[in-house]
Amino acid sequence: MAAALATEIRALRSEGHELAAVASRQRSTAADFASQHGIAAGFGSHEELVQHDGIDAVYIATPHRLHAANALACIAGGKAVLCEKPFTINAEEAAGVIEAARRRRVFVMEAMWTRFLPSIVTLRRLLRDGAIGRIDTIVGGGAFIPAPAPGNYLFDPELGGGVLLDAGVYLVSLASMILGTPTRMVASGLVGEQGIDERVSMVLEHAGGGVAQLYVSLRARRSPDLEILGDRGRIRLEAPVFRPPSLAVWDAAGNATSLACPIQGSGYGYQLREVAAALAAGRIESDIMPLSESLSIMRTMDVVRDQIGLRYPFEFRSAAGG
């Protein structure tokens, strides 16, 4: 992700974006990355980066477990934050980051890039205009089998691995965007021998009567998509749901229309433009991906994890004061 964002930032240089510095836990790693992406400064610690005067905003691409600590360090240094999803490991961490950001009046946003893509902008317009009427059900999910690789965070519970925080967050976030915060959640899942969730199914019920039925798995293969069913039609976000290239819309009579939604570059640039616009306007959060919703999404995933019996080892140690 760090490499993808670095490439996108360089592509947006004509719009005023400048890639100023990179930090890693090892100075040699930062230096190599800086050389590959034409970055002037490479630091061997995140503390050095935060203290750099020539930086307005920091993109956090570290493993899930480090998101909260890295975001808090940036906030303390007065740097705006674009933090990779999931926003944090759990709602308690999310609340701490949000409180610090609001107290220091520093911009912070979860990097849920999907929300800013043309297909999702079109989806919000269609739903706002009542294209499919009252929303009754959302059905979505996907499955993939990652290749085992040394150091892969997906298989490491100490880094917050597993399928829910990595892939399920897209589905939970979309359901939240469409239906709001769920009022009741029922989940089942499989926590494997490595201590990470390999399969999760969720039913999220909402106050308005809508329900979202979602699943993710590391044990099978299916391209992730999502359908929204209303009383006057339905809409399908074509796969992959995290970067939908088009929408399919059916009216009440069953007539289908395909809406192409071309994406510029990798698609990561849209969220970068949101950060730049917010900073230019003096805003401390995004209206499209507000902090209150990032917190709500983390609370939903906390409930899901509790119901499937998933707790990371470091969460036990934190609770015990270790």
Image (cartoon, rainbow, N blue to C red):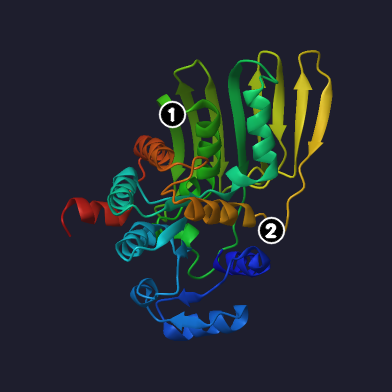
- Which kind of residue does numbered mark 2 sit on? Ser
Image quadrant where residue 300 sits:
top left
Residue that lies at the very extreme toward the left in this rendered image: 321
Compared across the picture, whether 235 is left or right of 55 comes to right
**Badge 1: few (under 14), some or many (20 or more) residues near its Cα, within 10 Å?**
many
What separation in Å lies between label 2 and label 1 (alpha carbons)?
30 Å
- For mark 1, give the secondary structure: loop
Task: Look at the image and tell me whether residue 85 can be seen.
Answer: no
Percent x, y for residue 297? 43, 38
Q: Quadrant of the C terminus?
A: bottom left
Percent x, y for residue 39? 56, 79
Q: Nearer the viewer, residue 77 or 158?
A: 77
Percent x, y for residue 162? 47, 51
Residue at image point 58% right, 43% down: 115
Residue at image point 56% right, 51% down: 274
- Tell me if residue 30 comes above or below residue 103 in the rendering: below
Q: Quadrant of the N terminus?
A: bottom right
Residue at image point 59% right, 69% down: 6
Q: Which mark is residue 266?
A: 2
**Badge 2: few (under 14), some or many (20 or more) residues near its Cα, within 10 Å?**
few
Percent x, y for residue 82? 47, 57
Q: Which mark is residue 105?
A: none
- Which kind of residue does numbered mark 1 sit on? Thr
Compared across the picture, whether 189 is left or right of 33 comes to left
- Tell me if residue 84 comes above or below residue 7 in the rendering: above
Residue under numbered circle 1: 181
Residue that lies at the very extreme toward the front in this rendered image: 281
